[in-house]
Amino acid sequence: DAKTTQPPSMDCAEGRAANLPCNHSTISGNEYVYWYRQIHSQGPQYIIHGLKNNETNEMASLIITEDRKSSTLILPHATLRDTAVYYCIVRVANYGGSQGNLIFGKGTKLSVKP
Amino acid sequence: DTGVSQNPRHKITKRGQNVTFRCDPISEHNRLYWYRQTLGQGPEFLTYFQNEAQLEKSRLLSDRFSAERPKGSFSTLEIQRTEQGDSAMYLCASTHLAGLTDTQYFGPGTRLTVL
């Protein structure tokens, strides 16, 4: 699975959009980009994933560049409860039932401030 | 769908004791993963099950660790002769593997402290 690079920390004002970047320059054509977050002392929470098209759900939007070498997770109106560590993970599609475990880096610690 | 549950949430034990953790996955999820997370690090893969079969174990899983998923439903992770280095959060995740992608859903974790 390709390696990802994320800034160690970011701040965001409450009510503003939080834009979390992720570089994955060695991503392969069959690798998806997943985002999880982990609020202090809880298990990781799935946010969103995508292959090459932009994706949106009730939690966030995922913007993937055309060359797929980077992506941005957007929380449109950040709240204090969005304070967490956000993990960007690149993961191969489950062709042939591969192992499929997630490989976490250190993520980005997002602090939402009032 | 009640989510993935793990018990106990916290466990304090003395070095050398055995401990067992339980994970109840989301109903009908055919894959179950165990991860370990130490302070300041992301979760690291330990092992996974496809139904009741344990298919892969990482090198982090020493021979003091054993995991089971007897009927393809709940799973247990046992650590024998615990050491202080075993202190960590133990996370369980489940997913239904079908098609090209799947989403792993995590439980709240069991925090182990070895004194």
Image (tube, grey):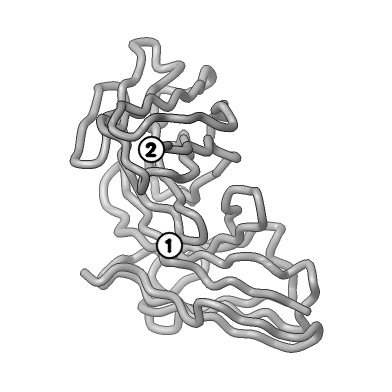
- What residue appears at the point 71 percent right and 58 percent down from the top-left corner? B59
* Distance Cα–Cα, label 1 vs label 2: 33 Å
Q: Nearer the viewer, residue B92 or A60?
A: A60
Vertical comparison of A69 with B22: above or below: above
Q: In x, y percent, where is residue A100? A: 46, 49
Q: Which mark is residue A84?
A: none
State which chain disc 2 sits on.
A
Q: In x, y percent, where is residue A5? A: 57, 26
Q: Amino acid at mark 1?
A: Ala
State which chain disc 1 sits on.
B
Vertical comparison of A100 with B16: above or below: above
Residue B56 left/right relative to A45: right
- Same subunit, tags 1 and 2: no
Image quarter of residue B24: bottom left
The residue lying furthest to the bottom in this view is B17
Total marks shown come to 2
Vertical comparison of B14 with A93: above or below: below
Q: Amino acid at mark 2?
A: Pro
Q: Residues within 10 Å of mark 1 (few under 14, many from 20)?
A: many
Q: Residues within 10 Å of mark 2 (few under 14, many from 20)?
A: few
- What residue appears at the point 32 percent right and 48 percent down from the top-left corner? B102
Label 1, on which residue? B93
Image quarter of residue A104: top right
Residue B40 left/right relative to A110: right
- What residue appears at the point 44 percent right and 67 percent down from the top-left corner? B108
Q: In x, y percent, where is residue B45? A: 58, 55
SS at badge 1? strand
Q: In x, y percent, where is residue B79? A: 68, 79
Q: Nearer the viewer, residue B49 or A87?
A: A87
Label 2, on which residue? A114
SS at badge 2? loop
- What residue appears at the point 46 percent right and 40 percent down from the top-left corner? A86
